[in-house]
Image (spheres, rainbow, N blue to C red):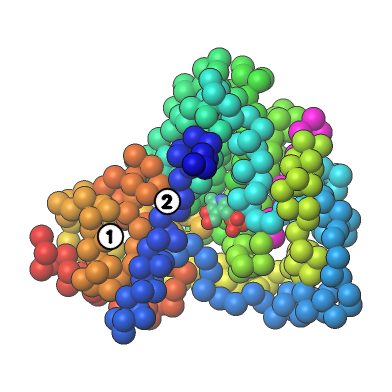
């Protein structure tokens, strides 16, 4: 009898994919399903990026590339970081990976082992906890609270650090809440980390281009004091609507870079060459495509928040980043996962229950506004009818 190692009994997944599968199955039966469950831009990849990918294939970029990525893309990432965060990083510290998830996988593999503790946001991207458990490390949730605008609390985060803590995962702008942690709170967090020099930090900034209401994204790369233990995670999936291309990049402190490179050699060899050339076009090309997408998300964000606050028993604070709203459904009387499942089956609206993002997600739903304003309005109307009739 085959015997798979026990770690696979601990690995989780993203329920968003299961919701998507169910929504598609219902649609295949002829049901009109509106999908507010999915975490990817609904716009196509900008045309000049697509053309760059096609040109790379026509130009014969068909082979392996260096495992760390092609030099011009690593240089383009360094320029992007200089332009957006006003921070100089060496292209030699940049690793090109097949999606943001791969950076997270590598970082958690480097620090996770039985006896180690890893701090991660809850509610947060479900793969953090899944990967931590896979390594046998102890996942320590950092509560992300509505009362705090769904930002990290420096005080609460620092209070959870113990001598066993090996890695702290930070995510702002955040999935699933849309929370953006303000500069003052990041200042306090980084200042407090001075007392914990053995704790590495992974900053997931995949939604870094998407903030609203003048709330600036403040990169952890800006703090020289933690640069020797900071892993910066970013990528093209969200900012350039490139989820299916699989292109991410990370910046590693020198002592970790070679370990990450070796993992890349062992796991995937390299990101496919044409995708890397498309990535150069994304980063070095005109950025108005990003600004236009963010402006469109901003418009929909206001529609979603207004509509949610108009639903019986629901309240929603205005998210400052990403493309998610995280309404509080406490006064509807429904448990979040039950409500999400029933809304899909009975009202044809796909959303995700907060508990799919952690124990602190109970009492909330996640709605993605990566769908047309028209569909968002139709979904909100259906939710209103449903919640009015089914108390
Ligand atoms: N980090 C967060 C917070 C995300 O929400 C996602 C995707 O949903 C990722 C990372 C992974 O992105 P990628 O598709 O580039 O692997």
Residue furthest to the front in view is 1
Percent across and percent down for residue 175 are: 48, 52
Question: What kind of element bears circle 2?
Answer: loop
Task: Name which residue lies at 48% across and 27% down.
Answer: 138
User: Is residue 377 found left or right of 320 in the rendered image?
Assistant: left
> Can you tell which quarter of the image residue 308 is in?
bottom left
Span of residues in magenta: 247-256
Q: CA distance from mark 2 to mark 1?
A: 16 Å
Give the label on residue 145, or none.
none
Asked if labels 1 and 2 touch by Cβ distance under 8 angstroms, the answer is: no
Residue denoted by label 1: 340
User: Percent x, y for residue 192?
Assistant: 58, 23
Which residue is depicted at the point 64% across and 74% down?
Answer: 45
* Quarter occupied by the C terminus: bottom left
Identify the residue at horizontal 82%, vertical 55% (top origin).
69
| Closer to us: 384 or 131 | 131
Q: Tag 1 or tag 2, which sits nearer the N-term?
A: 2
Q: Can you identify the residue that label 2 sits on?
A: 177
The image quadrant of residue 64 is bottom right
Q: Residues within 10 Å of mark 1 (few under 14, many from 20)?
A: many
| Residue 120 x/y as whole percent | 50, 36
Horizontally, residue 370 falls left or right of residue 168, namely left
């Amino acid at each position: 009898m085959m015997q798979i190692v026990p770690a696979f009994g601990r690995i989780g997944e993203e329920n968003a994919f299961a919701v998507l599968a169910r929504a598609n199955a219902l649609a295949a039966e002829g049901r009109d399903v509106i999908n507010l469950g999915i975490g990817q831009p609904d716009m196509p990849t900008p045309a000049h990026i697509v053309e760059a990918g096609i040109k790379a294939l026509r130009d014969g970029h068909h082979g392996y590339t260096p495992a760390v990525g092609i030099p011009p893309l690593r240089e383009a990432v360094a320029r992007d970081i200089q332009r957006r965060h006003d921070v100089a990083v060496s292209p030699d510290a940049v690793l090109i990976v097949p999606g943001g998830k791969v950076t997270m996988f590598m970082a958690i593999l480097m620090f996770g082992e039985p006896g180690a503790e890893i701090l991660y946001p809850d509610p947060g991207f479900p793969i953090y906890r899944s990967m931590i458990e896979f390594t046998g490390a102890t996942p320590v949730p950092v509560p992300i609270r509505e009362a705090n605008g769904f930002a990290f609390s420096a005080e609460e985060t620092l209070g959870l650090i113990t001598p066993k803590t090996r890695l702290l995962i930070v995510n702002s702008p955040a999935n699933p809440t849309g929370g953006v942690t303000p500069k003052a709170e990041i200042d306090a967090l980084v200042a407090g980390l001075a007392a914990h020099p053995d704790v590495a930090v992974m900053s997931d900034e995949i939604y870094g281009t998407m903030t609203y209401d003048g709330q600036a994204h403040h990169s952890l790369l800006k703090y020289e004091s933690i640069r020797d233990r900071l892993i910066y995670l970013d990528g093209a999936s969200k900012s350039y609507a490139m989820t299916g291309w699989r292109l991410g990049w990370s910046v590693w402190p020198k002592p970790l870079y070679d370990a990450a490179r070796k993992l890349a050699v062992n796991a995937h060899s390299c990101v496919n060459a044409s995708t890397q050339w498309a990535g150069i076009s994304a980063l070095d090309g005109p950025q108005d495509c990003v600004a236009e997408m963010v402006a469109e998300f901003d418009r929909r964000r206001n529609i979603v928040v207004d509509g949610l606050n108009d639903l019986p028993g629901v309240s929603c604070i205005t998210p400052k980043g990403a493309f998610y709203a995280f309404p509080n459904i406490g006064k509807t009387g429904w448990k979040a996962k039950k409500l999400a499942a029933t809304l899909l089956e009975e009202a044809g609206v796909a959303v995700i229950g907060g508990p799919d993002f952690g124990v602190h997600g109970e009492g909330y739903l996640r709605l993605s506004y990566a769908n047309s304003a028209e569909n968002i309005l139709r979904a909100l109307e259906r939710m209103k009818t449903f919640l009015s009739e089914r108390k």
